[in-house]
Image (cartoon, helix red, strand yellow):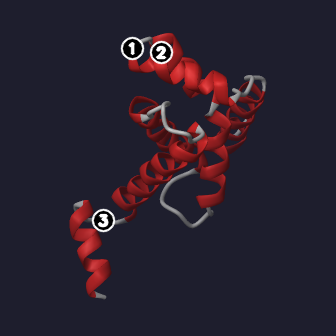
Amino acid sequence: MCITQDYDETLAAYFRSIRKIKLLSKEEEENLARRVAQGDEKAQQRLVEANLRLVVRVARSMWNPGLSLTLADMIQEGNIGLMKAVQKFDGTRNIRFSTYAVWWIRQAISRALINTGRTIRLPHRKEQLMKTMY
């Protein structure tokens, strides 16, 4: 068996496993967000698990074969962004968690692409400055 076939099977197994996780209603999100704010780790885990499909969707939309990261790496970076979104989410505002989390997911993936895309890594602020200059 070749490495790419093992890789594809692993990714397919991950997709099958997250497909089984039940999505949350707005009320469940608000309840979990309150519990996360109080320090409940199980609520934090449930909120992350329920939104893993969102990470896959965002990573797939940003991925193409010429990038420095594989799809699995982009999903992993997106998961890190999702965990940050769970910690910072304010459930008292009238906004769905997925709307809030997508920005953190995109930021985490974008930063990972920037950090791995160059031979010499530039700090984020320098990268932004160069974009405005040219």
The residue nearer to you, when weighing 27 against 77, is 27
Residue indicated by mark 3: 119
* Secondary structure found at label 1: loop
Residue indicated by mark 1: 38
Task: Give the left or right position of residue 36, taking residue 25 as reference.
Answer: left
Q: What residue type is labelled 3?
A: Thr
Residue at mark 3 to residue at mark 1: CA–CA distance: 43 Å
Quadrant placement of the C terminus: bottom left
x and y, in percent, of residue 31 in the image: 57, 19
Instruction: Classify residue 125 by image quadrant.
Output: bottom left
Residue 95 in view of the camera: yes
Can you say whether 132 is above or below 4 in the image? below
Q: What residue type is labelled 1?
A: Gln
Residue at mark 2 to residue at mark 3: CA–CA distance: 43 Å
Residue at mark 1 to residue at mark 2: CA–CA distance: 5 Å
> Residue at 28% of width from left, 70% of height from top?
127
Residue indicated by mark 2: 35
Q: Which amino acid does label 2 sit on?
A: Arg
Of the image marks 2 and 3, the number of the one nearer the N terminus: 2
Instruction: Classify residue 37 by image quadrant.
Output: top left
Residue 122 in view of the camera: no
Task: Give the left or right position of residue 118, taking residue 54 as reference.
Answer: left
Instruction: Classify residue 3 by image quadrant.
Output: top right
The residue nearer to you, when weighing 73 against 1, is 73
Q: Residues within 10 Å of mark 1 (few under 14, many from 20)?
A: few
